[in-house]
Image (cartoon, grey):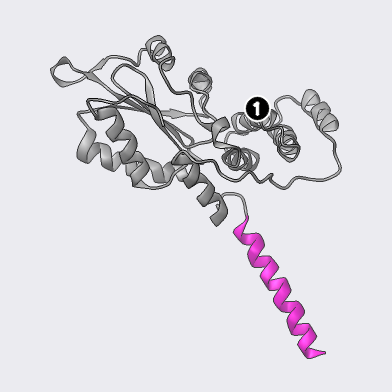
Amino acid sequence: MKTGKWNLLAVLVGAALLGNCLEPGHAAPESKVRALAMSQGGAGAVKAPARAPGKSIAELNQEVQANPTSAAARLALGQAYMSAKDYLKAKEQLRLAVRLGKGSAEAQRANQALMALPQALVKPKTGAETRMIASMLGLGRTRGAGGAARPTVIDFYASWCQPCKQLDGVMGRLLKDSYSDKVKYMRVDVDDPNSQALLDQYEVSPIPTVVFLNSEGEVVSYSVGFSGEHAVRDGLSKITATTGSGAN
């Protein structure tokens, strides 16, 4: 009987420890691997986040219609679409949950869920058409020393996003040490209502997301999530090189 009690105690303690590891704001190892794969251009394995059972997508849509500004309702509907493998609709609802939640637990869970979507759905807009965006926003042809056009780095972040803080430290050090006179650097707070047009133009989903624009204003590289200094240095090297403009 004593042995049985000790085994039960061990199970309970193990379950409590596992629950602590998966609290919002603490990335599980699997999430870190997925973010690393995405930031390097690879797709992470899609795993739908847990959600409360029992409600259909139709019922959840009714709740969203009744409470369109509810981050919790948007999150639940996005999770349901993920379970149904309707990733485009999941992305739409999860982006809204992040936007409406503004750092709440629901916003953080939605951001983590966005990281789990296929890489092709969460990457920002790239290519020649982004030159028009930069031109409209006044980002292209920024002049540096000697009148030469300078590339631009746009860092989309939020104050509640822990990976964003890690990225900011690395970015700040690299810019100060090696790129201060070579690129223009912008930080865009996704919770600022004035930032929404920029988010939509560049199709930014999870954060952190960084887009690297060459001197013509074209997005030629990007990074989603934070995977260390290498990804940042790689993006900076692409926009400061004299040749090459293909997006990865």
Q: Position of residue 53 (x, y in %)?
A: 82, 45
Q: Is residue 228 visible?
A: yes
Q: Position of residue 118 (x, y in %)?
A: 59, 37
Q: Which quadrant of the structure image shows residue 238?
A: top left
Measured along the vertical axis of the image, is residue 11 above or below residue 235?
below
Tell me which amino acid carries mark 1.
Glu
Tell me the magenta residue range.
Answer: 1-22
- Residue located at (31% from left, 40% from top): 233
Residue at the image point whose x is 41% and y is 11% from the top? 132
Task: Say few, some or many: other residues with alpha carbon within 10 Å of mark 1 (under 14 / 14 to 19 / 20 or more).
Answer: some
> Which secondary structure dominates the residues rendered in magenta?
helix
Residue at 20% x, 20% y is: 144
Q: Is residue 6 magenta?
A: yes
Q: Position of residue 92 (x, y in %)?
A: 65, 27
Quadrant of the snapshot with the C terminus? top left
- Which corner quadrant of the image does residue 180 belong to? top left
Image side of residue 189 versus residue 69, left or right:
left
Question: Horizontally, is 84 left or right of 205 in the view?
Answer: right
Q: How many marks?
A: 1
- Dot 1: element: helix
Query: Can residue 211 be seen by looking at this rendering?
Result: no
Extreme bottom residue here? 2
**Circle 1 is placed at which residue position?**
92
Between residue 92 and residue 107, name the one nearer to us. Answer: 92
Residue 204, above or below 2: above
* Quadrant containing the N terminus in the rendered view: bottom right
Residue 216 at x, y = what percent? 31, 16
Q: Would residue 159 be counted in the magenta stretch?
A: no
